[in-house]
Image (cartoon, rainbow, N blue to C red):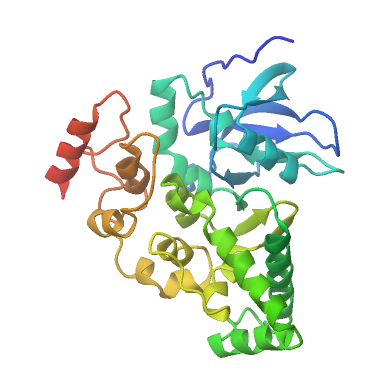
């Protein structure tokens, strides 16, 4: 089978590629890569041709030393193990699914295209019907806590009337009722499960900040289980856990009522963002700046700072300091 080769994006305007993940239960992962247009507010009167609904994947690429193969448009494509496992967990048995996956939908060997696509990543994630946050493979303790978070989510829906938000006290009461009969060792397992999830490498990756902040709706996915990100973000205080400093700001910006009452709603200039997320990690050091531009209140549309991968790190830092 021939190896997959990217072709330049032909559509005019805010165009990008989408991945149709073909249905299946076992066997090789098969996909179709095709072009689409972003449905932006300023383009609402335009033709709906080439505009598709999609879910955007947020995950860590992981180690590249043991790649896996998938089939894209009838050709072979190599992906990281994490990419393969994420597609495996997200594949439906009964119907196809349309996704945006950065490692596959952007030609990573084309620096010009990469820069162009990075500029519109905020719009890609905000335009998704939901953002799927894949934290990795499941373990016994993560499955255990994910099960109870799902129960909390379902009970919370029963207490929601006319779109009115549930109070903090109500969440505490619902959770207390759910776990009241658990033994101490079972409660400990819940804590271990959540701590395990919060230690996943996803929380350290710099690009997930933009992906999470732009999400209108998000799900946390681990193995075969998924829960609402807005409910997941409430779990640390319910289990009396203090997340690591790099982790709490991520929970603060997950879509839901907590985001609207956090520091995010009050102040998110570039200086604040660089400080909040200073412990985030990136393969390319320039991304520790580029990943925050689109979500900052004062640097999202400045000519001085643009994602330019042809520029060296020193020049990027100089431009950033000049802006600040």
Q: Position of residue 143 (x, y in %)?
A: 72, 61
User: Residue 177, located in which quarter of the rendered image?
Assistant: bottom right
**Which residue is rendered at x = 71% and y = 51% of the image?**
223
Q: Position of residue 14 (x, y in %)?
A: 47, 34
Q: Position of residue 9 (x, y in %)?
A: 53, 21
Count of residue discs: 0
Relative to 13, 94 lies left or right: right
Q: Position of residue 181 (x, y in %)?
A: 76, 87
Q: Most extreme residue toward the front, as rendered?
A: 185
Which residue is at the front of the view, 41 or 145?
145
Question: Up-down: is 39 above or below 129?
Answer: above
Relative to 221, 23 lies left or right: right
Question: Up-down: is 7 above or below 34?
Answer: above
**Which residue is rendered at x = 64% and y = 90% of the image?**
173
Question: Up-down: is 147 above or below 80?
Answer: below
**Which residue is rendered at x = 56% and y = 15% of the image?**
7
Q: Most extreme residue toward the top, as rendered?
A: 2
* Residue 156 shows up from this direction: no
């Amino acid at each position: 089978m021939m190896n997959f080769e990217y072709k330049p994006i032909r559509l005019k305007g805010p165009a990008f590629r989408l991945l149709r993940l073909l249905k299946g239960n076992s066997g090789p992962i098969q996909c179709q890569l095709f072009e689409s247009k972003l449905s932006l507010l300023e383009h609402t009167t335009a033709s709906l041709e080439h505009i598709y609904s999609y879910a955007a994947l947020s995950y860590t690429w992981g180690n590249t030393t043991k790649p896996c193969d998938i089939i894209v448009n009838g050709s072979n494509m190599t992906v990281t193990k994490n990419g393969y496992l994420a597609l495996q967990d997200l594949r439906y048995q009964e119907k196809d699914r349309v996704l945006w996956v950065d490692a596959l939908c952007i030609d990573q060997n084309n620096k010009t295209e990469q820069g162009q696509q990075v500029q519109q990543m905020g719009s890609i994630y905000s335009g998704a019907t939901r953002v799927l946050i894949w934290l990795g493979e499941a373990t016994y303790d993560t499955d255990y806590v994910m099960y109870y978070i799902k129960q909390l989510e379902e009970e919370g829906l029963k207490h929601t009337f006319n779109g009115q938000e549930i109070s903090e006290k109500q969440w505490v009461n619902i959770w207390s009722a759910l776990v009241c009969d658990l033994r101490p060792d079972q409660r400990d397992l819940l804590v271990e499960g959540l701590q395990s999830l919060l230690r996943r490498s996803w929380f350290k990756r710099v690009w997930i900040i933009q992906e999470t902040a732009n999400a209108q709706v998000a799900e946390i996915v681990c193995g075969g289980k998924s829960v609402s990100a807005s409910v997941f973000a409430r779990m640390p205080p319910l289990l009396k856990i203090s997340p690591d400093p790099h982790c709490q700001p991520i929970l603060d910006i997950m879509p839901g009522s907590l985001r609207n009452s956090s520091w995010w709603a009050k102040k998110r200039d570039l200086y604040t963002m660089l400080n909040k997320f200073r412990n985030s990690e990136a393969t390319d050091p320039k991304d520790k700046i580029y990943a925050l531009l689109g979500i900052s209140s004062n640097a999202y549309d400045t000519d001085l700072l643009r994602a330019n991968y042809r520029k060296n790190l020193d020049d990027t830092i100089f431009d950033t300091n000049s802006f600040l």
